[in-house]
Amino acid sequence: MSDFSEDLLRPTPEDDPAETSVRPRSGMCLPWLQKQVESVATRGKKEKDFAQTTSACLSFIQEALLKHQWQRAAEFMHSCLQILEDSDSHKRQAAPEIIWKLGSEILYYHPKSSVETFNTFADRMKNIGVMNYLTISLQHALYLLHHGMFDDASRNLSQAETWRYGEKSSSQEALINLVQAYKGLLQYYTWSKKKKELSELDEDDYAYSTASQNMFKHSWKTSVSFSALVQTPGVWDPFVKSYVEMLEFYGDQDGAREVLTNYAYDEKFPSNPNAHVYLYNFLKREKAPREKLISVLKILYQIVPSHTLMLEFHRLLRKSDKEEHHKLGLEVLFGVLDFAGCTKNLTAWQYLAKYLRQILMGSHLAWVQDEWNSRKNWWPGFHFSSFWAKSDWKEDKALAYEKAFVAGILLGKGCRYFRYISKQDHQDLRKKFKRMKKLVKKHSIVNPGP
Amino acid sequence: MLSGRRTQALRLRPGREQREVSPRPQAPGTQSQGLGFRPERGSRRFLPEVALAAQKEFRERCAQCDAVSWGLTDEGKYYCTSCHNVTERSKDVLNSEAIPNTKIQAINRGLKKRNKLEKGWDWYVCEGFQHVLCQQAEALKALGVGPELKNQVLHNFWKRYLQKSKQAYCENPVHARKRKASVLGSPSHADWESEPALLSDASGPFVESDGPRKPSPPSRASHSEMASICSGSLDGVEYSLRKEKGLVKMAMPTTLALCGLSLLWQREALALSDLLRFVEEGHIPYVNAFERFPEEMKLYGRDKGIFAIESWPSYEDVYRQMIDVATFLDLPRFPAITEDCYLHPNILCRKYLMEVNLPDEMYDFTCQVVKMAGIGEVDFLTFDPIARKGRTVKYDVQAVAVIVTVLKLLFLLDDNVEWSLSAIAETYNEENKEDKPCFDFRKWYQVMKKSFDEKKQKWEEARAKFVWKSKKPLYHSPIDRSVVYKRREMVVNLQKQFSTLVDSIPTAPKNSPSSFQFNWTEEVTGGTCFHGHSLQGILYKKGQSVTTMNSLYWLSTQKFCKSYCKHVTTYEESNFSLTYQFIINLFSFLLRIKTYSLHEEVSLIEKRLFKKKYSTAKTKSSRSRKVRK
């Protein structure tokens, strides 16, 4: 390892926030912009032309990258490398990351670049400044995976996993966990491939026992890789999912439950709907009591009221014995239909139509009015305009029918949607329409005129 | 004993023999042979301290002449300086560690001082600057500047500087003060007492490590070790701390100021802007000039701040330094700038008219303006540091400003008149295809705009690609050394990797230095050369004289700043017409100066031209002018 002792001698605490702010978010991040903004403040000293050169150079690279001129970007990169030798130690320590990001981008796309070039570059960059070793290793592994080099990526991760350098800072520890988890993910991949092979084998087959033994060994290693990461707060969906799958496969239901409960309920973790989905699915597989399922989905309902599981939630609530659950059931349905993405959801409308009738028959008019009051000034335009009436009728007669019924109940038979649909003459639906009109007349929450 | 350094020196400087003829007065008794020279050449003068040291150490009387005056041969043996008798006593015996004499150690520093820190020679900061100046002078010579510049003018300026700054050629130089307390042979001082008057002195050529050898090395065995922790040079720390009133300290930009002064003294055909442009283009060593120091001159620590610069020299900065240095050196009046000198505005105007592709006929107008403004006078142009304190002419900027003024006189440059005049010229050209074409401002603008934008883009890219970091990295202290070198190696490796991704080899052939940046010869540009165009279309005859069609004028500055701040005017781009902005941008790019300094110069010329307007304080901005032909 040929790292620079200097980085160890003076680990600047300011480094960390900058690093973390750039690292995890996927998508576009332009570190050089940040650097340029920083370079404007020059502590009262006259800025050296060196700084001018490097910032001009960075903006030329940026421009070239945006225009996909890899050749040109590489040209400027050649001189940009001198930022590694900046005499301002603060800037110098930030340099390897910039170089790595720009360089890896160029090498990823450059026509003359190859996996070998990328590998050399990554290996060199890993050893400039210890602080970036893990990040670069991880990104390097992802690059290799992208090129289908599974084994190399795995080897790379193993190397990074065992890497230690003096007292590692807390941010580095999190990174090591992440590296380990990625390693675990790769192992999981092998494992599930084996599992698939196994499922194709006959149980009496000679090969079966060795294969299953292999699998067992794998899972043990993997669970070690995952467990550390899963304890640290964060969003680790793919890792958690694979981890739970393996635990379940080997019958460690308690372990799986613990992981999922922790993932969903630990307050240190960021709010994550998937955590609750995973937990719910797990509990469902376990055939947990309804009460428990409802409590999980209740949280999901608070985070994502439009989630596809909400209809399932509604069913659970409807079947429940408690009255408050029944009320919540109505709320959930209304909530789902508040979202533009769900306006054409036939099941939701069906449920609502059916449930409204049921509730009004059960004389809970107040519940309906509660929900309706906040929506009455925008739902008519949102769901029940004549435009929607026409298009719904054209596209999906069943949907139009359900919506017309709901419209009739909520807005009275004078409403445009209801009128338009009920005027349509359709042989198959004639009977249904008659019934609908009758029901609307009977249950509509709008008082017919005096 | 032949030290590594001396051999190197000999190899580097074949001119050394001549140097020894320098007219320093000879001090009796100190005449001795230098390291690396045979004793037979006893007539040759040598560094007094060397002889002195030898003398002190080896005190026996000479077997032949009874004198006690010993010198060292290059085999390290003692020889008598009066009768040239070589003894069998070699210095090595005396020079063992047991002997507490520090002087000897100082003498053969080339060998003994190279200890585990890879320490090279003992050297002074001014020695470093001397190397830089030497390189720059050589480069100037290669550019075609006369050889007298290096050997006489710059050399003398430098000697004078060393003397004025009390570093050498004077009694009690700075370096020697430290050891003053220690008892030393006083005869050596006599050597420096009567330095020759510099400017009258046609002394030998200017050779590297000439001057600084004169300050006698202080007893620095302990001192240098201490200093070496913070710098490679002996006095790096002291030097960067040295602050005296009225002292002009050498810094990298000062080397250029000295070059600029020498060029001015010689009245060479190289303006300051050209000098700085050549520096930027790498024809004159400046950035990383220390790379070419002899290998044994180690630089680190404070030396880094002194010699490794990470900025290009700025015109204003070097210009100011030139005046400061000239005043500090107490230089007499410079040779007169007459009409046949390159730096005379008429000649410079002609050059810049060619450079920016303007018709030759405009030359008459620039001459008129120069005459009317009175800026062509010898007294006005000649630099006299003492008489005209702190004032000199920015020859190139001024010439360009004259051209801008003429353009304003002819075309007004108010985004209106110039275009209507262009329309007239265009129709004239269409109707008279046989005739000499009439200058069409619009066409000229289109051609210039394109070339200017291309040139500027290229320049910006070159600046962005500029490699500042030396191949020979500098570190703060020997502890950092390995880190710095490792980092350097990394960068080189990475650079290699990226250069393989570039199609064309990045080291594009350096364009040879030229005083012109644009080339408008017909073959190259394909008929876009305007040199031969006439100004007929925009002039008309009025009796005996010719008057410009445009009878208006506006002043670049209505009111000059009278407060005590240094600037006389300001340049807020958006307040001016687009054409004026373009012209100012174009010219300031050519000279690599800030736009406001050109604007200021234009305003100053206008101030001289329209004295009346300013004195009556009328803000009438229109004015007609007759031009006699």
Image (cartoon, grey):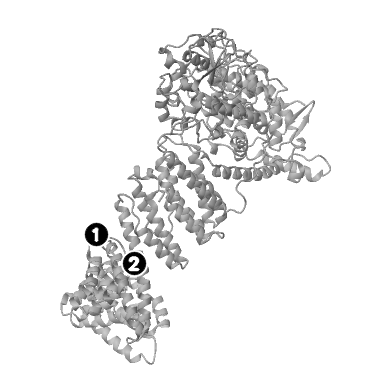
Q: Specify whether residue B375 is in view.
A: no
Does label 1 or label 2 sit earlier along the sequence? 2
Q: Quadrant of residue B581?
A: top right
Measuring from the top left, give residue B34's x and y in whole percent: 57, 19
Residue appearing at x 54%, y 29% in the figure: B4
Q: Quadrant of residue A327?
A: bottom left
Measuring from the top left, give residue A304's x and y in whole percent: 29, 68
Q: Which mark is residue A268?
A: 1
Question: Is B27 on the left-hand or right-hand side of B299?
Answer: right
> What is the secondary structure assignment of the residue under circle 2?
helix
Q: Which mark is residue A184?
A: 2
Amino acid marked by disc 1: Lys
Q: Residues within 10 Å of mark 2 (few under 14, many from 20)?
A: many
Amino acid marked by disc 2: Gly
Q: Residues within 10 Å of mark 1 (few under 14, many from 20)?
A: few
Q: Specify whether residue B445 is in view.
A: yes
Q: Which mark is residue A290?
A: none
For residue B406, above or below residue A109: above
Tell me the chain of label 1: A
Number of numbered tags placed on the structure image: 2
Tell me the chain of label 2: A
Check the picture and name the quadrant holding the C terminus of chain B: top right
Q: CA distance from mark 1 to mark 2?
A: 23 Å
Same subunit, labels 1 and 2: the answer reads yes
Question: Is B458 on the left-hand or right-hand side of B521?
Answer: left
> What is the secondary structure assignment of the residue under circle 1?
loop
For residue A141, above or below residue B25: below
